[in-house]
Image (spheres, grey):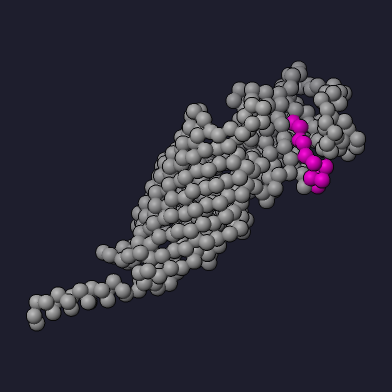
Amino acid sequence: MPVRLAVLLTLSLAGRTLAQPVTLAEVPQPGECSRYAVDLDVSGTLSVLGDGGKPQSLKLQARAKHRFADRTLAVADGQPARSVRHHVEATASSVVGGEKSDRTLAADRRLIVTARKADGPLAFSPAGPLTRDELDLVTEHFDPAGLPGLLPGKEVKVGDTWAITNPAARVACLFDGLTANQLTGKLTGVADGLATFEVTGTAEGIENGAKVSVTVSATGTFDVAAKRVTGLAWKQTDDRGAGPVSPASKVEATITLKREPLAVAPPGLADAALAGLPPGDPPAQLTALRHADPKGRYRLVYPRGWHVTGQTDTHLVLRLLDAGEFVAQATVSTWRKAEPGKHSPPEEFKKAIADSPGWTATTVFEDGEVALDGGRWLYRVVAAGTSDGRPVAHAFHLLAGPNGDQVAVTFALHPDKLKALAGRDLELVRGIEVGR
């Protein structure tokens, strides 16, 4: 065979080989383990209200680093439905308007269970409640359980495209709810047993009650023989409106993910280490969050619907969201200490309520003591009225501990939201322990 003809034939065969379709699909199995390295870089601006209510732009820079092993516990609809992760490292640092803050995962909270639920992903520690910072730390990065959803799940050729499904887009973009999805995948190459693909486009959704628009430009690698995504570089720009618990922002985020299959579960994910995991939905005390007053005056364990939005030396402010909708604001305030075993007289508390600036009660729904355990005493007043001429409802609580330490907790909401509050004020107050 002439040399020229042999070369042409080789090139022709190579071309046909490259044109061969590849199956771009993962089939997760219970018991599978992988090791992950995930790094996050974020830059942009936050829009907040400054002095006098004037808009102010604050520069944001943030980095996070995660090193963990993951073991799939259950699979549903071809996707991991329940997994457990052991974090070797989970840290984040941010600078907002020149102020730096650092976050890390407590040593006894390094085992995290994740589950895919109808209303979104759920993460908790079997060791006990997480702080909000810890919860954000282990959830605000690309969820490895979403990797299979980026693939078409079928044979494709180089140049073929596919639509990213709505459930996959919701997981990838960390939305509580998806409102629009134009994300598209494309197979860009196959060489040396690795397929490369990209995900591009836009999506819109809701997160913590705020509208978010994202633009995505991502590339990934897929091991054809192992049938697994091995790496992902995910770039995303966010345009976020102001929400009930977060300011407006415009940021750019880059996530790099590396994945390594493990033939054997590491010690932190071995059967013995997972023996105590709750088999089904976790009890409420594991999905609750914890917060401690910096001066040790009280501790709070509360449902995740509440979000801390402000803190001073004397006040803690939380807001309640229900399916992204603002329901009520709670303010925890320090109150003068009484003698051990005693509390302030109810008349003194009610006088303080009546003297609240701008507040006028028109209807009182409840007024009296509420039974609590642990030697605690609670007085509660629920009323509707006006505040500076606007309709408002309040639920006032005075909580005393066995040693006389006291806090007042005031809930403010529109009267139309009283049914939505539905005793969740008491649930929050019952989670407070006062005193050192």
**Frontmost residue, 389 versus 335:** 389
Q: Which residue is farthest top?
A: 339
With respect to residue 326, does 14 lie above or below?
Answer: below
Indicate whether 396 appears above or below 29.
above
Question: Which contiguous range is marked in magenta?
Answer: 409-419
- Find the residue positioned furthest to the left: 2
> Which residue is nearer to you in this view: 92 or 302?
92
- Residue at horizontal 43%, vertical 50%? 235
Q: Residue furthest front?
A: 54
Q: Is residue 69 magenta?
A: no
Q: Position of residue 415 (x, y in %)?
A: 83, 42
Q: Out of 117 and 313, give the one closest to the viewer.
A: 313
Picture mark count? 0
- Whether residue 52 is visible, yes or no, is yes
Side (left or right) of 240 relative to 319? left
Q: Residue at x 78, y 28 (%)?
A: 398
For residue 411: magenta?
yes
Q: Is residue 243 left or right of residue 231?
A: right
- Residue 137: x and y, percent? 50, 41
Where is the N terminus found, in terms of image quarters? bottom left
State the quadrant of the C terminus. Answer: top right
* Left or right, 254 with reference to 423: left
